[in-house]
Image (tube, rainbow, N blue to C red):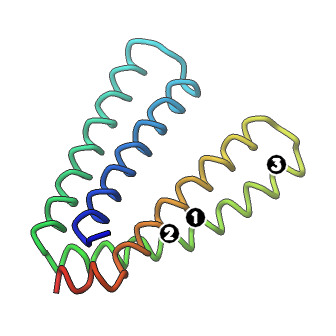
């Protein structure tokens, strides 16, 4: 798999994650006019942001890669800590929402870990230079 394909795959994975987040947000906040409007706005904004960052990476922007490596490493650690804390909360309360929120945090942490692994891959480093 080439570096370009890895970056495109990562960008597409983020689109899927944002879609998953939008669906979860609708289930959590209910389906009303303002809920639909705010969810659609935030989904579109995040997709545009992912598209922009993906394009910057494909254009071989070393600064973008550097900033994203820092951000993904920080949020990977915070995501794992948050998942562990929320998992502990689930075992204390046995609440469905704490279980669901644990899954959401685990998915978010997995996305940041995946981003870190792709951005620090040797072929991606060589591609961006």
The residue that mark 1 highlights is 79
Q: Residue at x 28, y 76 (%)?
A: 67
Q: Residue at x 34, y 75 (%)?
A: 119
* Residue 32 position in % (x across, y down): 45, 12
SS for tag 3?
Answer: helix
The residue that mark 2 highlights is 113
SS for tag 1?
Answer: helix
* Residue 5 position in % (x across, y down): 27, 63
Q: Are marks 2 and 1 in contact (CB under 8 Å)?
A: yes
Q: Tell me the quarter of the picture where residue 88 sits.
A: bottom right
Distance in Å between CA atoms under marks 2 and 3: 23 Å
Q: Which mark is residue 90?
A: 3
Indicate which disc, 2 or 3, sits on the residue closer to the N terminus. Answer: 3
Most foreground residue, 20 or 129: 129
Q: Residue at x 42, y 21 (%)?
A: 35
SS for tag 2?
Answer: helix
């Amino acid at each position: 798999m080439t570096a370009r394909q890895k970056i495109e795959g990562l960008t597409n994975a983020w689109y899927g994650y944002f879609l998953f987040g939008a669906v979860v947000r609708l289930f959590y906040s209910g389906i009303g006019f303002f809920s639909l409007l705010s969810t659609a706005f935030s989904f579109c904004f995040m997709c545009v942001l992912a598209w922009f960052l993906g394009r910057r990476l494909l254009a071989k922007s070393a600064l973008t890669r550097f900033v994203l490596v820092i951000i993904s490493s920080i949020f990977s650690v915070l995501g794992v800590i948050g998942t562990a804390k929320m998992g502990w909360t689930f075992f204390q309360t046995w609440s469905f929402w704490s279980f669901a929120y644990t899954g959401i945090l685990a998915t978010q942490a997995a996305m940041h870990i995946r981003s870190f692994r792709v951005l620090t891959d040797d072929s991606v480093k060589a591609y961006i230079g």
